[in-house]
Amino acid sequence: MNESRPDDDEQRWVHAGTATSPGIGIGEAYVVGRRRVAVPHTYIEREEVEAEQIRFHEALVATRTQIEAIKAKLPHGEHRQILKAQQMMLRDPDLIQRTETLVRDDLRCAEWAVATAIDELQATLDQAETEYFRERSSDIGFLGRRLLQTLVGETLGEISPPEGSIVVAHDLSPADTAQLHRVRVEGIVTEVGGRTSHSAIMARSLQIPAVVGIEGVTNIAQTGDTVIVDGVHGRVIVRPEEEELEGHEGERRRYDAFEEKIQKDRAFKAVTQDGLHVITRANLAMSEDMELAIRHGAEGIGLYRSEYMFMNRDSLPSEEEHYRTAKAVLRKMAPYPVVFRTFDLGSDKKSPLLMARGPEVNPAMGLRSLRLALREREMFLAQLRGLLRAGVHGPLRIMLPLVSSVRELNDGLEAIEEARDQLIRDEMPQSDDIRVGVMVETPAAALIADLLAERVDFLSIGTNDLIQYTLAIDRENEEVGYLYEPLHPAITRLIKRVAEAGAARDVPVSLCGEMAADPRYTWVLAGLGIQELSMNPSAIAVVKDIIRASSSEDMRQLAERVLAARSAVEAEAVVYETMHARFPEHLEHGAGAGVPSSVPEDD
C-alpha cells in the first residue's frame, strides 16, 4: 500500500512504499528527472533500407559495448549478472526481427522502428501474470532508451550523485544503479518498481537501502532536501524534523551495529545451544551470485535454479555448457554440496525457445517442470549428461521439481539412468555418487512423502508452490493475496508429515521456499523437524544467529503450539509473540533479509 501525507506545516512529507533493500539511509536528495529521447518519425527511401539496418546493428554492438564497460568496473556479484542479462536482451530475436521488418516493410528510420518495437515488447510484458515479468518491461524500456540515444548520437547522461546523497528518481536502470557503488550513496527512492525490479535487486547486492513504489516523490523532493530512507519498514521522510532526524540516526547506528555483529559470526555453523545443527544453504539462479552466498556464510547451495540458463537466449544450452556451469559452481562452493534443480520451465518462467507451444489456460497446473522435461527429452538428457559429468568435480546433487506421483519420480529416475548409460557408451567420465532428490511442492507429494522417500536420497519442500496448490490461490493475484498464509494449519501439518516421513527412512528433509528466509518462522520450521534451510543469501546470517541463540526444546515447543492452532491468524499471533520477545532486532532486520534475490523465489 502506498501512502503520502503532509505534516501540518506542509513541509515535511512521509511516504509509505515497498522496502526492497534493508538499512537506514540519511542524506541530501539528488533528484533525477525523467530522461526522454526525441525520436524522429522519418520515412526512408527503398534504397536506404540496407544502410539503415546496418546502422541499427552497429548501434546494437555499440550499446552492448557501453554496458560491458560499466560491468567491467563492478566487483563480482549479482549486479554484474543483471548487466549481462541486459546485454543478452540486445540479442533478443523479437526485438531485432521486428525492428528489421519495420525498416524493410514500412520504410521507417531505425530510431522510429526501434521505438515501435520496444513499445510493442513492453505492452506484451505489461500484460504478464507475474510481477517478475512485468518488471522486465522497464528493463526493455531502459535498453530502448540507451539504444535510441546511441542511434541519435545523444550523450548518455549517466547520473552522478555526490557521495552520501539519497538518489530520488522515477526509476533507475540497472546501468544507473551500477554506477552508485562508486560514489557510496546512502539510499535510493523510486516512484515505480517492485521487489523483483532490477534496480531493487542491484540495490540489495550493493547493500544500499532502498524503498520503491512512491508515486510523485520526484515532484515533492528537491535536490538538497534532507531525506530519510527506511529500507526496513518501507518509509521515506522528506525534510524531517530535527528530533525525527536524531531518532533515525540512532536507529541507523543500531541497525549497522547489529549488521556488523551478525556478519562477524556468519562463518560459524547454525548449532543450537543443546547441539542441534540446522544446515543453512543458499538459493541461487546465477553462478555469478556465488560470491554473495559465500560472503553470507552459506553451507552449500540448497537450490540452484538451472532454468535461467534457458532464458534470454536464442539457442538451447548444450551439454557442454551445463557441464562447465556446474563444474564452476562446484569448484567455487567446495567442499560444500550444490543441489541443481533440473529446469523448472513453464508457468511463470517462460523461455522463448518453447514459446511455440502457445498459451495454456492454467499454466501453473499445466505442462511445466518435470512434466515438460520428460516431454522435451533430448533437452532434459543434455542437462542430465552435463550434470553427471560435472559430478566428478564435487558433491553435486540433482533435484527433480514438481513431482506429484511415484510414477513421475520413476520416469525422472529412468531419464537419469538413460543419461548415465549414454555417457558410459561414449566413454565419458561421470560420477556414480550423485544423490538424487525431489521437491515436495504439491499436496499429493506431501501426502506420499513416505513413498517418495523410499526412492530418493533427500526431500526438499518448496513452500511457495505448496501453499499455492494447497490453499487453491494464485500467489501472484493481489485480489487473493490475503489468503496466502504460511502458517495455515494445512501447511504446517503437511510440513510436519514430510519431515516425519524423511526421519522414518533416514532421508534428509530441507525447505527452500520463502519461509526459510523469514526469521519469524525459524523456530517453527526447525521444531517441525526440518534439518536444512535454504534461502536468499542475505537472510542466512540472521537465521544462523537466531539458531545459535536457541535450544531445540524451545523450537519444538513452539512448533507444537503452532500445530495446535485452529487458524493461521492464531498461529501467527503465537509465533510473533514468542519470536518478537526473544529476537526483536532479528525480526526487524529480517524485514529486508527475506526479500527475493536476482530472480523471484518460486519454490
Image: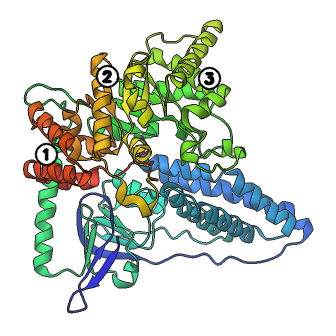
Label 2, secondary structure: give it: helix
Q: What residue appears at the point 48 percent right and 59 percent down from the top-left corner?
A: 175
Q: What residue appears at the point 32 percent right and 42 percent down from the top-left corner?
A: 490
Q: What colour scheme has been applied to the protein in the rendered image?
A: rainbow
- Of mark 2 and mark 3, the one earlier in the sequence is 3
Whole-percent x and y of residue 260? 16, 48
Q: What residue type is labelled 1?
A: Lys
- Of mark 1 and mark 2, the one earlier in the sequence is 1
Which of label 1 and label 2 is nearer to you?
2
Q: What residue type is labelled 2?
A: Gly
Inter-mark Cα distance, 2 to 3: 28 Å
Is label 2 in contact with label 3 (beta carbons under 8 Å)? no
In the displayed orientation, state which residue is furthest to the bottom: 9
Q: Can residue 133 be seen in this view?
A: yes
- Look at the picture and state if 305 lies above or below 380: below
In the displayed orientation, state which residue is furthest to the front: 566
Task: Please name the residue that numbered disc 2 is placed on.
Answer: 502
Whole-percent x and y of residue 424? 60, 7
